[in-house]
Image (tube, helix red, strand yellow):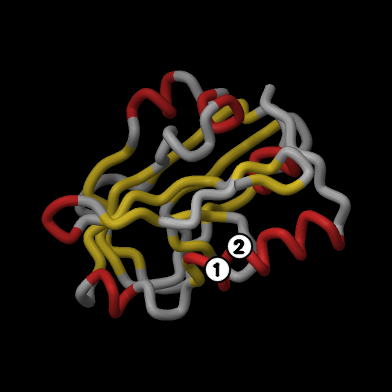
Amino acid sequence: MECNGCEFRPELYYDRDYQIWVRIEEHGLLAVGMTDISQTIAGKILHVRVRKPGTPRPAGKPVATIESGKWAGPVPNLFDCTIVAANHEVLDTPGLLNAQPYDAWIARVQPAAPPHEALSALLTGEAAWAGYRARCLRDDIRCKRI
């Protein structure tokens, strides 16, 4: 699915600003990444820094920091978790977040609560698509891959 060239994957979970996506993985782990909207707004990603594995991160504290040519900021965290791993491919080649935003996860985390409980505040499926599409149209976001 897409809107204005911005790819959307309905099986993922999204924050309400459509900056990040979260995917449930094996053993209750969650992968966290940037949406197509987010990578487009950020521009060419130059640097990614992920907190050290084993670091607990309460809701509201970032799991990573991203820098682009025009922006630097946190990767928001919406639930209590512990960092399990950083994606070393993304650390070595940050532009993967621009080229493959849904395949290039940033960090894997272990949520403090069961995954579906931890993700209860995020949107998925049709509800997420409606908001994602509305954001693309309202803000006239036209995604492109760098």
Residue 55 point in image, percent of width and height: 26, 56
Please, what secondary structure does the residue beneath circle 2 have?
A: helix
Please rate how many residues cluster around mark 1, counting C-alpha atoms within 10 Å: few if below 14, some from 14 to 19, many from 20: few
| Residue 72 image point, x, y percent | 66, 43
Is residue 69 depicted above or below 58 in this figure?
above
Which residue in the structure is indicated by mark 2?
129
Residue drawn where x is 60% and y is 47% of the image: 1
Q: Position of residue 37 (x, y in %)?
A: 68, 47
Residue 7: quadrant of the picture: top right
Residue indicated by mark 1: 126
The residue at the point 65 percent across, 40 percent down is 39
- Disc 1 marks a residue whose amino acid type is Glu
In terms of depth relative to the viewer, which is nearer, 145 or 78? 145
Contact check, label 2 and label 1, Cβ < 8 Å:
yes
Name the element at disc 1.
Answer: helix
| Residue 131 in the image: above or below residue 6 | below
Q: Nearer the viewer, residue 88 or 137?
A: 137
